Amino acid sequence: MGSCIVMIHVKPIASISSFEKFLRMRQATSAFGLVQPRPSALDSLKSTDNIKITMDTVIIKIYGPNRFKITNWSLFLPELEKRNYSDLSPTERSSLRPYLRRFVLQPKWQREYLPRVEVFEALTSDKKDIRYILKIEFSVPKLLYWNSLQEVGPSDQQRVFSALKSALESVSITTENETIANAIVASVHACKNIPLPRHIRMREIISELEKIDLNKVFDISDKQCKKGARVLNIHSGTIDWSFYDKISDSIRPKNKRSDKGRIDHERTFIERYNLQDREVFRYEYRIKKTQTVKREINILLQRDYQTPVVFKDLFVPSIMKTLVLNSWKAIIERPENQLSLFATADRLSLFLHILTEARKQGERAYTLNTALVSYGLAIVIKDHGAKEVRGAIFDLWNTDHTERLTKKIDLASELMRGLPYTNNIAFINNALERFELISLTFLEKGI
């Protein structure tokens, strides 16, 4: 995140009372435990007491013709000019590119929240005609509340469709709620905000999470600003995990933020509820490609992989909660990450625990050797993380059989069964299990 956190005075958009009234008009209505068994996705979706929907950025696509209409083409750069198939050159007609031309909406400034809009001119699949595709990127909570601290609730589906329809109409794009509901989802960010108690600090959580590892497909980056605020990203071409403090990120300059959307109203909201000196753990699971969206969502809905995922599918009860929980468990339940995230009173207690678990497998030299190797791996991975340990070993050792180290890590993880996560990780894990919705009522109680 590369720069210090700064406090910027924002001129209020209205008086405090009117701003609070505005927010209300836009809204419809620790125990530290041991590692718990992972619930099935279907059980989570069927549970009637888990109806929670928390998403932020969504990208949807509406495919023409006749599903949307643009009445002011001059708002796009370059200026949108509709063509017929007969207008195409021979090179364009045989093009293998995903689109022929791209137009970006550049509207005049207005107070209301606006999505990012692009129009693509593309050939049909049989290359015998032209079709236009409307791509819309927006933050669901900002569309409703002008901030992403509040979270979208289970009853907000129709309000979201109507708010997006209204926002598009303000820039001369007309479509119907039903069309929006059935728009193809190209990307979705499932997320959760967790207010932290004062004894748990964001930088401590990031320091623990930065030791995790997934596999060689993913890169892990930890950015830190001058005053200590940090963001941790785990990213690949199709999926990202992101962890950061939502409050400090919201009050930073736009070009330094993780969330680069409109910020004035969000800052005013933070000041209104005296959140400037608090920390809110923000977890985002970002699915970035259409094919990955189909893979992740359809398996939860028990549908065929090829079934298109449409916007209204994201409002199925608890589907966002299940995505968030499953993605979080996929990190902390990996054997190498359990070695880096466990808690124990001291190293002797850890050693005795591993010896006790190993002895259950029989008093043989092999099990003692396994216990000694497991203890060594547990200590070094706890201190430095699995990725660093793997790199150090294979810098000096033969890399022909890396699966042997993986097997030893798995054995070490098995011998550490029964040990809890650290207090910080256990707090986040329990908060994600509860999945309490962040609303105005919640914030008025104080965090």
Image (spheres, helix red, strand yellow):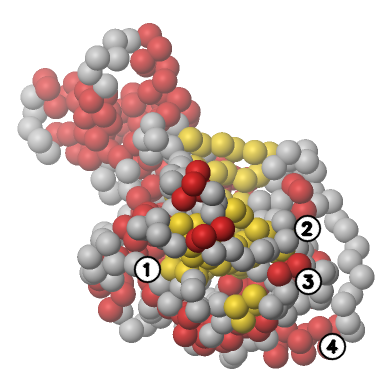
Q: For residue 206, what is the image quadrant?
A: top right
- Residue on which the image places disc 3: 265
- Residue on which the image places disc 2: 251
Q: For the residue marked with disc 4, what is the amino acid?
A: Ser
Q: For the residue marked with disc 1, what is the amino acid?
A: Val
Camera-side mark, 4 or 3: 3
Front-most of residues 300 and 322: 300
Does dot 3 land on a helix, a strand or a loop? Answer: helix
Give coordinates of residue 36: x percent, y percent: 30, 59
Q: For the residue marked with disc 2, what is the amino acid?
A: Ile
Real-space Cα separation, disc 3 to disc 2, in angstroms: 11 Å
**Residue 420 appears in the rendering:** no
Q: Give neighbour class at mark 4: few <14, some 14-19, many 20+ (Cα, 10 Å).
A: few
Q: Quadrant of the image for the C terminus?
A: bottom right
Real-space Cα separation, disc 4 to disc 2, in angstroms: 22 Å
Camera-side mark, 1 or 2: 1
Does dot 1 land on a helix, a strand or a loop? Answer: loop
Side (left or right) of 181 relative to 269: left
Mark number displayed over residue 309: 1
User: Compared with residue 376, is residue 5 higher up or lower down, i.e. above or below?
Assistant: below
